[in-house]
Amino acid sequence: MSTNVRVQESLVSVIIPTYNRPEYLRKAIASAVRQTYCNIEIIVSDDCSPDNPQPIIDEFQDSRIRLRRNPQNLGIALNVTSAFKEAKGKYVASLNDDDLWNEDYLAKLVPYLDANPDLVVAFCDHYVIDSDDKIDYLKTEKNTRYWKRSRLEEGVYQPFYQLSVVDQSVFIALATVIRRDAIDWNSIPLEVGLFWDLYLAYLACRSGKGAYYYPARLTRYRIHPQSETQISGKKNVQAKIRTGKAGIFCYEQFMADENLQEFRAYFRAKLAQSHTTLGIGLMRSEQIAAARPHFWKAIQYKLNLRTIAALTLSFTPGSIVKLLKV
């Protein structure tokens, strides 16, 4: 493969965090290698998978790819932020190991950052695909509406607090290119956990710089049984506990930020949801005493029937089995 670089192209560091998904990883790397924007480095950040992914990287015979491999499993937040800290590019972009980029993704977004130093991110919309790479157009449209991108016009948004931490339109983990030196990469706490991308969007908007929205679907988000978002929403107890803890940490940080005071009601509702999620996770792991304070805390933030039902079940014999339906 040719790696000739046009002089005018700024270096982009592509971060691919991965853990134990070799077949999807191979596809993700291929979509990065095929970018029509050539001046990239690709850092595959492996969180101590059972099988070393180096042989997969070797298949591509592309000097732009390198592997960093943690000696032990560190979790998604530390795995991905450690890779960001090693990036050398003027810009950085994350690609989950189970997702894909269109070939023109970087070529379409990077020029906006090059042309305007007052931008910290350039972002786009994305398709939803299944385990076999097939686009689900109904889910794609629903997804675009849910994250409010259907309401966005192309152009610069500055400031973009609401886009980043309320509407969450800026999808850092898949569909956003970031100006690397605008972010303090040492200021991402481990407690953000699964919400590392939301917290990074928060840091981006706090930079005071703007965001450019390009209204096209240039990336592909995969929904499959092993994805963390699917697991968190179902019956995996530890995933639910991780989700609840990460949400509580992030939304407490946001609510304390003087720049975000207009969104306090929203953050209170999200804190109620996060405490309830953590409480249910703790109950499912039979930690009833530890769960109840989270239900009480959730009710203080916002009265919710789901929370009341879970709290009531915590005092009911045999509640663990019943809670699986809450």
Image (cartoon, rainbow, N blue to C red):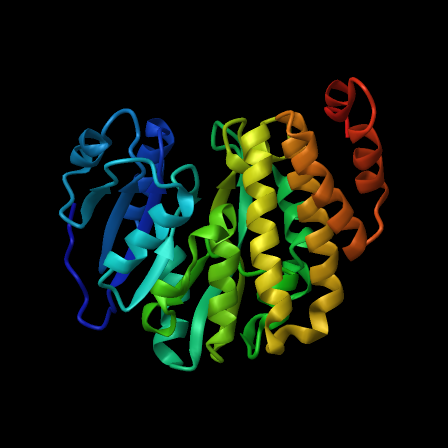
Q: Quadrant of residue 311?
A: top right
Q: Is residue 155 left or right of residue 103?
A: right
Front-lying residue, 113 or 35: 113
* Picture residue at 41% right of the left edge, 43% below the top: 76
User: What residue do we see at 41% from left, 49% from top?
Assistant: 77
296 displayed left or right of 88: right
Mark count: 0
**Which quadrant of the view contains residue 44?**
top left
Residue 166 appears in the rendering: yes
- Against 257, residue 58 (above or below) is above
**Could you say where residue 81 lies in the image, as x and y percent from the top left?**
35, 54
Q: Is residue 153 visible?
A: no
**Residue 46 higher or lower than 185, as above or below:** above
Q: Position of residue 316 (x, y in %)?
A: 83, 24
For this view, does 80 lie left or right of residue 220? left
Residue displayed at 77% across by 56% down: 301
Which quadrant of the structure image shows residue 88? Answer: bottom left
| Camera-side residue of 300 and 43 | 300
Q: Residue at x 16, y 34 (%)?
A: 58
